Image (cartoon, grey):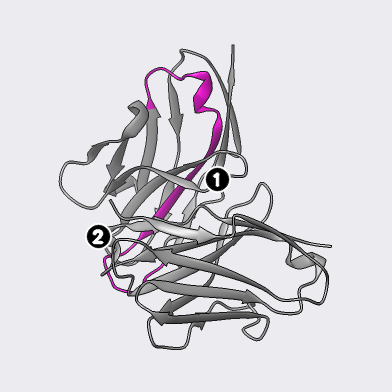
Amino acid sequence: AQSVTQPDIHITVSEGASLELRCNYSYGATPYLFWYVQSPGQGLQLLLKYFSGDTLVQGIKGFEAEFKRSQSSFNLRKPSVHWSDAAEYFCAVGANQAGTALIFGKGTTLSVSS
Amino acid sequence: GAVVSQHPSWVICKSGTSVKIECRSLDFQATTMFWYRQFPKQSLMLMATSNEGSKATYEQGVEKDKFLINHASLTLSTLTVTSAHPEDSSFYICSATQTGGIHGYTFGSGTRLTVV
């Protein structure tokens, strides 16, 4: 079955500290992987995506993610977290096929302490 | 870049009435649109997939007679919640894609529906 697992429901990090949000996927076809961020009551903002090529992907706001096929993982990282990064983060997987929807993980809530 | 406009951003309606939510692709032709539902502090759950000119494909457990989806043109899809009840209160988000995932999935800003 196709699925996305985000093992951490809630993470708290200190401002300025590094961050890693975990994402594991199960997908039958070649996966296309995404990270989105959502602030309360808002829509989704795309942070980064991986289709092919370099497995280390750079995104907006200083985020990066690394695709590891052997581990079926696509973890999101940021070297130094800012208070404004507090939000809900979703990992999603899709396929390069017309009509294929994204499958989302349950999300990780990031809190930033001062 | 690709933009999807979703309207209204929030709506309050009385039980038993119907509400229509619009999702428009502003600068590209959306061959496929997706409708998601998100409960508070939960993830996005796919409700249905609609292709222009075809009947929508609903996910298991989604009542197609309650959630009517129309995708009459390449730039517009609508979701109508019929005979709304308080349990239909939720955040609804649409997503559009042009020719498969490699071109990206563009999301609308969402609609907060409250049924009183």
Percent x, y of residue A92:
42, 53
Image point (50%, 50%), residue name = A5
Q: Please tell me in which quadrant of the rendered image residue B86 appears.
A: bottom right
Q: Would you name the residue on which mark 1 appears?
A: A107
Taking the magenta stretch, the answer to whether it contains residue B37 is no
- As measured in the structure, the alpha-carbon distance from the residue carrying label 2 to the one carrying label 1 is 23 Å
Percent x, y of residue B14:
82, 68
Image vertical order of residue A17 relative to residue A21, above or below: above
Quadrant holding the C terminus of chain B: bottom right
Secondary element under disc 1, as helix, strand or loop, is: loop
The chain carrying label 1 is: A
Image point (29%, 43%), residue name = A67
Image vertical order of residue A20 relative to residue B94, above or below: above
Q: Would you name the residue on which mark 2 appears?
A: B102
- Left or right of residue A69, residue A86 in this image: right
Q: Give the range drawn in magenta.
A: A78-101
Kindly tell me whether residue A61 is visible in this rendering: yes
**Towards the viewer: B67 or A31:** B67
Callout 2 amino acid: Ile
Which label sits on residue B37? Answer: none
